[in-house]
Amino acid sequence: MIKFFLMVNKQGQTRLSRYYEHIEINKRTMLEAEVIKNCLSRSKDQCSFIEYKDFKLVYRQYAALFVVVGINETENEMAVYELIHNFVEVLDKYFSRVSELDVSFSVSEIHL
Amino acid sequence: MPAPIRLRELIRTIRTARTQAEEREMIQKECAAIRSSFREEDNTYRCRNVAKLLYMHMLGYPAHFGQLECLKLIASQKFTDKRIGYLGAMLLLDERQDVHLLMTNCIKNDLNHSTQYVQGLALCTLGCMGSSEMCRDLAGEVEKLLKTSNSYLRKKAALCAVHVIRKVPELMEMFLPATKNLLNEKNHGVLHTSVVLLTEMCERSPDMLAHFRKVKQLSSSQLVPQLVRILKNLIMSGYSPEHDVSGISDPFLQVRILRLLRILGRNDDDSSEAMNDILAQVATNTETSKNVGNAILYETVLTIMDIKSESGLRVLAINILGRFLLNNDKNIRYVALTSLLKTVQTDHNAVQRHRSTIVDCLKDLDVSIKRRAMELSFALVNGNNVRGMMKELLYFLDSCEPEFKADCASGIFLAAEKYAPSKRWHIDTIMRVLTTAGSYVRDDAVPNLIQLITNSVEMHAYTVQRLYKAILGDYSQQPLVQVASWCIGEYGDLLVSGQCEEEEPIQVTEDEVLDILESVLISNMSASVTRGYALTAIMKLSTRFTCTVNRIKKVVSIYGSSIDVELQQRAVEYNALFKKYDHMRPALLERMPVMEKVTTNGPTEIVQTNGETETAVLETKPPPSGLQPASQANDLLDLLGGSDITPVIPTAPASKPASAGGELLDLLGDLNLTGSPVSAPAPQIAQPPFLLDGLSSQPLFNDIATGIPSITAYNKNGLKIDFTFERSNTNPSVTVITIQASNSTELDMTDFVFQAAVPKTFQLQLLSPSSSVIPAFNSGTITQVIKVLNPQKQQLRMRIKLTYNHKGSAMQDLAEVNNFPAQSWQ
């Protein structure tokens, strides 16, 4: 099951966040900061799946934006990896060559 | 009031903020503006304000005051309002807030709205955050929508149904009839969501699962064949632009179907059979050059492993995993390692074939891969490959990150214990681990290692030599130093005598050995426990070494005033050994016997009589199953007559030779009685060391063999002492004697002390008596428990000495008890 879906940039600013489980608001920022720290510390040729606490993170980097999805064990990691890419492609089509700015400005549209 | 700024403006302004504080300021200003605008009940700009609020919520600022506004937006008629309102509801509200119930009516109306988009919105929101009450109320509507022909709505309704089922599992049956037709759709969206719905139903309820496996669907085909057909169509069909992802058509649906097949086929032969073909087909036909193909293959492999597939298929699956391992992409390798870990239990041999690749993965740079490879390597170690694997694992231990070292060390210990080809190899391996990752090993590794060393008698010289060399250079790794000091203490004479068959013997003098032990004691790096070990080792050497006894005496006396209470206690007691009880020193500090691994530690094992300081002290560490960290101090105090403490008695292995104890008893003369004054003062070392003061109240045996007749052991001058016997079934060499002393005279007997001695081959333990006054006229008794260990099953004999005050004078009597019944000792 997907726990959350985040798009965070390299400086740690959250561009999009969607949580599918209830987490308190202050914990969310902490979670996001830690998650991005984990992702940033990995080099390019390292595995895209990180084990974090009791679930897994699947992340993918697109330019300066990280898309991170938190999943639990029942989910197929590679399928989620593909899902991320699919999502980005959809955004690309929608905004015609999406960039980080587009994401930041059209939050509500992306949500839906 | 000027019109509130648009969301984009807000975002732009926030982006210009350079520091966190500036950003916070801007946001707070905007929040204030929004709040006042809400108060004014302005309809036109409400949606803009809520949108801004949502953005700020995403950044992490509190936005709960917008919840009611969301509700108002939902109630409005404009679509844009509704859109933002529902979004806000999804993000801000959840079951914890009471406000959400107000939404129920709105959602109900919207579910029946004419526009499908509004209906869609309502379904989304309900599916996202509906609470159980809301779900119960609205489930009927959802079910109705599941049956419509509008595929846009159908797929959303299916997902909403999933959420309803998660929240209110009882409603599952309601959706059952609607699912019959779901899989007949062409629209992939509907197919996908219906597969999700079916998966959820099957996972939640085994009844549903059985139902789906068997029942015939309306279109006269069962579920499994239907799924198989769909999957086949997906694979076989040509390029379809709307579902294509890098050459494979709708991989997401394929993965979902595979997962549902997995659930259906688990533990069910018929379904598994039906799936075999399609699984083989998917496995062979999918393109593996892209990640997408690999994702599907991964899911296929997982499915094959879970269902009752035929062996050919399983071999195919493991080969696929092997291929993954050789792939360059890290993700794939990680995934392969994870799946291999799951299958290694069942298909051990097949996985062994890939052992070399797995071991190579240990050298990978990536942390996740290394961890998986390590776990898998441990699972793959067996008797044949243990030497090679150990080499690799030890090398890995050297170079891996600290977070792995503890796990790796424990794994190596376990594997070495199970598969060690020779004792020397085992000891070598453990030593290697201690020297490389010494500070990360777990605490119980030390006693395990000590036990192993005592067990390998022929290796003592070699072991102690190696350990000595190891700590010569560096004594910072605590477990290593602990083991080394223990060994040097035990086998120091072997070290000094320079005899060692296995290795080149080194020339060590006694002084050098003492040097190293003293430096351990002094060093700041040594933990308190380590110092304890070192001090005890030095003490033991006093019997093993010949020319440096004075030096040892000096060291021990220095620590008599140490700040560390533990060290001080030990030092003071050892000092006493030197001064007053020098004759006992050799016997006390004898070599430790081979320790058996005692697996059952119950209260039924008695402490060995001689309560050797060394064994009592150190045995708190060897006993394998977690004893409480017994206070070694208490054991020593036991020895020396402390009465008011209840120490934990460490369980001693039953194979302890009785010889040492016997000698001690001999030393103290035949009549030297073993008993304890009841009212002994608080532990003072000046007291004569009565052996065996097990003054804790130990529960008697749980399994008593009853039926042994009791005897009267003594009856004179009005004092009668009866013995009653109990023997344990689990430990037949132990007999428990309960004595009852009664007084038939007309005056009380006070200060009554009972003491007993047994011949050499026995061992005795006396527990504390119930009191020291026997009331007159048989109006009460003193009871005391004696435990006798009779390993050679010889006839019990006992000499008893009684002292008491009666009629103002002190009385004393000696007697021999010979009339023990046969059952008490046979």
Image: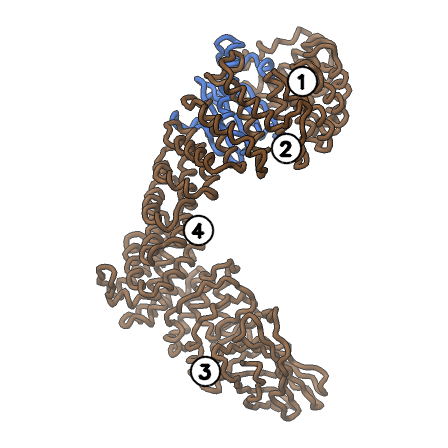
Alpha-carbon span between mark 4 and mark 1: 57 Å
Neighbourhood count class around disc 1 (C-alpha, 10 Å): few under 14, some 14–19, many 20 upward: many
Tell me what residue is drawn at x 57 percent, y 72 percent.
Answer: B729
Q: Do the residues at pointers 1 and 2 share their chain?
A: yes
In this view of the protein, can residue B340 be seen by the observer? yes
Quickly name the residue at label 4.
B442
Quickly name the residue at label 1.
B154
Image quadrant assignment for residue B150: top right
Q: Do the residues at pointers 4 and 1 share their chain?
A: yes
Mark 4 or 1, nearer chain start: 1
Tell me residue B419's x, y (percent): 38, 53
Quickly name the residue at label 2.
B213
Please state which amino acid type lies under the numbered disc 4: Arg
Q: Which chain letter matches label 3? A: B
Quickly name the residue at label 3.
B760
Q: Nearer the viewer, mark 1 or mark 2?
A: 2
